[in-house]
Amino acid sequence: MCLVTEHVKLKKRVAELEAQLPHIIIPVTDLTMISRQNYLNKMAEVGISPIDLGTPLDVDLSITTKAELDRIAPELVQPADDYISEIRDCEDYGIEAQSRASKYRVSGIRLVLGDMPLGYHGFVISIDVDYNIWWLEPNAGFPFAGIWHRVGDEDYYPDKVFA
């Protein structure tokens, strides 16, 4: 048998076995609480306003270090082939990433809407404990997905946050 063929078969088998392993979530323990109002004040400093919820649901949000944001970032990304325009699109990816972040106990990772090169778009945003603002693309179809960026990087300009 050809070594290349054998290698491909073994890679496939390893992927199958890995898929059977339980996914272990290691929660973030290095958390800091920030009031919703302070969170929104930091967002306002870069032109991001809240999506009006009428009555806010959260009084406080948990934030963490940039190192912890980087650690959980890959877990917030979903396969690009899940995208179906008008059914499962960008804001659904952002909502899913926000929900996944809560499993790591980081409630300060929120859905955000804003402009990017392809038009108006949904993704996620957070603040680290040093009060730096970071955004992340949760759709694996983008080459920079799963990496925290500063506002303006990759021409992403958020303007509304779900908080």
Image (cartoon, rainbow, N blue to C red):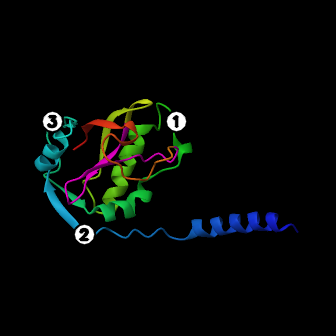
Q: Position of residue 133 (x, y in %)?
A: 25, 49
Q: Name the residue tied to disc 1.
A: 84
* Image quarter hosting the C terminus: top left
Q: Is 63 drawn above or below residue 25 in the view shown? A: above
Q: Mark 2 is on which residue type? A: Asp
Question: Is residue 147 rendered to the left or right of residue 2?
Answer: left
Query: Label 1: how many residues lie within 10 Å, few (<14), some (14-19) or many (20+)?
Result: few
Q: Is 118 drawn above or below residue 129 in the view shown? A: above
Q: Name the residue tied to disc 2.
A: 30
Query: Label 3: how many residues lie within 10 Å, few (<14), some (14-19) or many (20+)?
Result: few
Question: Is residue 160 rendered to the left or right of residue 137?
Answer: left
Q: Residue at x 45, y 37 (%)?
A: 89
Query: Label 2: how many residues lie within 10 Å, few (<14), some (14-19) or many (20+)?
Result: some
Q: Position of residue 35 (x, y in %)?
A: 12, 53
Q: Confirm whether the magenta stretch covers residue 4.
A: no
**N-terminal-most mark, 2 or 1:** 2
Q: Position of residue 24 (x, y in %)?
A: 44, 70
Numbered-mark total: 3
Looking at this view, name the residue that lies furthest to the right.
Answer: 1
- For the residues marked 2 and 3, what is the alpha-carbon distance in whole angstroms? 31 Å
Please report the bounds of the magenta region as a residue range: 122-141
Q: Name the residue tied to disc 3.
A: 54
Q: Residue at x 16, y 39 (%)?
A: 44
- For the residues marked 1 and 3, what is the alpha-carbon distance in whole angstroms? 30 Å
Q: Residue at x 32, y 65 (%)?
A: 67
**N-terminal-most mark, 2 or 3:** 2
